[in-house]
Image: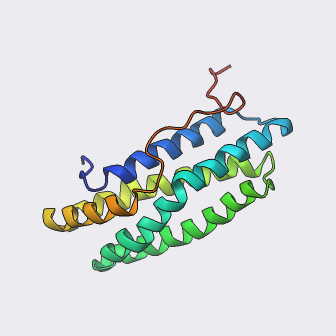
Amino acid sequence: MLRDKSLIPLSHQHQRALALCVRIDRAQPIPLADLKAWQDEIERLFEEEIDVHFSAEERILFPAARKFPELIPVVEELIADHASLRQLFSQAEERCMSTTSLPAFGQQLSLHIRKEERQFFERLQQLMTPEELAALGRELESALKDAAQSCALTNEVTRLKAKK
């Protein structure tokens, strides 16, 4: 199903976060000397985009979805995911990630995004009327105005490299 235009800004942010997950996965094994660069980028992504993204979902999207009883369990899972991911982002900020926790972070973030895109957004679009989705889109646009709107450049260490 095509993504409704009201949810596209969130999907674009998902794409940028998934790009980070792919780069983490392809960089395996990550040398200990490169951990700081990865954590710098993860911290920057959270500060510039993900923090605002999570907040918009929690304040606007999830309450709207709770009107549909079948979506309540997935909303609860997504809220729990946010809490867990916030702890991982905090580890990056504190420079506490290891060469094993960094790839685990990438996998967890990727799974969360795919759950939102493939399960939650798809079903939400089927349940909401076009008018409800449009109103939701206006609220999300306002809530996301403080998030970075462009792809940030990676650093030399975190840049996607050709497969070996």
Name the residue at 58% across, 41% down. Answer: 20
What colour-coding does the image apply?
rainbow
Q: Quadrant of the C terminus?
A: top right
| Residue 54 point in image, percent of width and height | 49, 64
Nearer to me, 60 or 78: 60
Name the residue at 36% across, 77% down. Answer: 63
Name the residue at 68% across, 65% down. Answer: 87
Please determine whether, in this image, residue 39 is positioned above or below residue 67.
above
Nearer to me, 9 or 72: 9
Q: Give the quadrant of residue 46.
A: bottom right
Nearer to me, 77 or 65: 65
| Residue 76 point in image, percent of width and height | 47, 75
Please determine whether, in this image, residue 144 is positioned above or below residue 66.
above
| Residue 77 point in image, percent of width and height | 49, 71
Please determine whether, in this image, residue 158 is positioned above or below residue 164.
below
| Residue 2 point in image, percent of width and height | 24, 46
